[in-house]
Amino acid sequence: MSSPPQVAVIGGGYAGFAAAVTLARGGARVSLFESSRTLGGRARVVETDGYRIDNGQHILLGAYAETLRMLRLVGVKPRSLLTRRLALVYPGLCALRAAPLPAPLHLALGLLRARGLSWTDKRAMARLMGQLKGQAYRIDPDRSVATLLAESNQTDTLNRLIWEPLCIAALNTPVGDASAQVFANVLRDSLAAAASASDLLIPRVDLSELFPVPASRWLAMRGHQVRTAEPVKSISWLESGYTLEGDPWQTLFEHVVIATAPYHVAPLVGALPAMEPVVRCIAGLRHEPIVTTWLAFDGPLPFPEPMIGLTGGYGQWAFDRSALGGPEGLVSVVISARGAHQDVQKDALEIALMSELQAALGPLPPLKWSRTITEKRATFACTPGVIRPDTSTPEPGIWLAGDYVASPYPATLEAAVTSGVTAARRILKRCGLKESPLLLD
Ligand SMILES: Cc1cc2nc3c(=O)[nH]c(=O)nc-3n(C[C@H](O)[C@H](O)[C@H](O)COP(=O)(O)OP(=O)(O)OC[C@H]3O[C@@H](n4cnc5c(N)ncnc54)[C@H](O)[C@@H]3O)c2cc1C
């Protein structure tokens, strides 16, 4: 029997671990290198002043089939995610809740019963969903979400309370720049799919603990290597395999999955001239920020839902972390994509967000602690016609994984996981191996 192929995975985010677990299930020997001491990359825990928070508040959707499969595979308990039927609630202003019915009645009834939307709004929303379905969710030629909304006469209220917040949350790109095709793909696979696909899944554990840490344990228990605080500086070809500068063992790898953020790829492949077109393609991507402000109050807050919408200020969504396994009074507020908030100092932003919370929820208990985390390059900007590199590269043993790799979806955990699984499966196929069909293998 020939010995199993040695495969390196560079990057311990969701894409890297999805690749590593899939490779291990196919019989490869995996070494994963992560430059940080903390696993998770752009979805990781941050320990600060006695609080365990995340670098950014995340939500998952019921439609994240590959992510949920991966969580099950590495033994993550279902209670690690709070599952809620879709509810877009702006306290005192608007509430659209999916009904407990099979699709499409869950949304149809939810829309009929929605508070704060007029009949004109409801008709316009049904019209756009019907129109998208009628054209099989194909937008040809691709254009901006703002153009799509204008073409189908969406109302100001719908744009402000439903479409723009959904687009920014899903694509992390302002509607004027966001790809209508990718937005339509998201609507097709969430709102227009089975009722459970539109469920909101909110982590009750930190983002490192949700997948990267259990995946790392799963790999270690099967004899694979997970090396933290070990940055790879570059990849070289050495006669019959690739070596990594930074690997103390100087292992010869048959395949390497680069599962870093896009802006970390170029230095890794500088010694591999065939990778030049890939580097050029990646250099064409623009990036958008996400800000998460964490506020700890000295007492509970009257959230009607664990997640509420904010409008008219800087904040977009606020989360009651006490309903999600966190301490009483802990709140996270998310601001996705670029915008006016970037011109405001952190202290002033936190004060503004508190008054927005107060306007939505009523008087707040005293503030005990706050922290604002800005991820300047949170995701690539998902614009019409954006060119994303493929999993396979011109260098036969080098593969890309990550939320920016070609996919019908925007940069999300699901895109990251799916890309990792795809890279791993292509390697296994190349090696004549197959993933084990057993869930717990
Ligand atoms: C603030 C914020 C909020 C978000 N909200 C959501 C959300 O609500 N829902 C959702 O689905 N998605 C959300 N996303 C997007 C999601 O977090 C990303 O799509 C996903 O985490 C990307 O995973 P990845 O594995 O592709 O890349 P990364 O997470 O960037 O992982 C790459 C890893 O590679 C490591 N690395 C880099 N260079 C090297 C090197 N040379 N050697 C070794 N290791 C290296 C990095 O340290 C990192 O750990 C959000 C992102 C941010 C930043």
Image (cartoon, grey):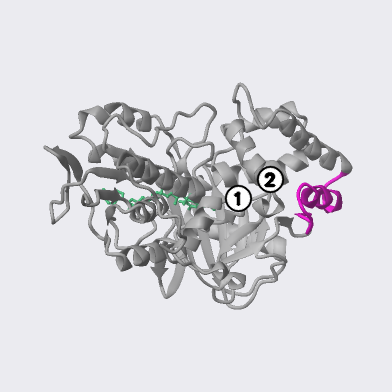
In percent of the image, x 32 and y 39: which residue is there? 430
Is 119 in the magenta? no
Few, some or many C-alpha atoms within 10 Å of disc 1 (few <14, some 14-19, many ≥20)?
many
Q: What quarter of the picture does the C terminus occupy?
A: bottom left
Above-or-below relation of 204 to 128 = below
Res 339 seen here: no
Tell me, for residue 193, which label it has, or none: 2
What span is in magenta? 94-118
In percent of the image, x 58 and y 70: which residue is there? 324
Q: In the picture, residue 304 is in which quadrant?
A: bottom right
Q: Residue furthest right?
A: 119
In percent of the image, x 66 and y 32: which residue is there? 137
Residue 26 picture location, percent across and down = 35, 52
Tell me, for residue 63, which label it has, or none: 1
Residue 307 picture location, percent across and down = 65, 61
Residue 236 picture location, percent across and down = 16, 39
- State if disc 1 and disc 2 touch (CB < 8 Å): yes
Amino acid under label 1?
Answer: Ala
Amino acid under label 2?
Answer: Ala
Above-or-below relation of 63 to 177 = below
Is 96 in the magenta? yes
Q: Secondary structure at mark 1?
A: loop
**Mark 2 or mark 1: which comes first in sequence?**
1
In percent of the image, x 26 and y 38: which residue is there? 397
Of residues 153 and 428, which is closer to you in this image?
A: 428
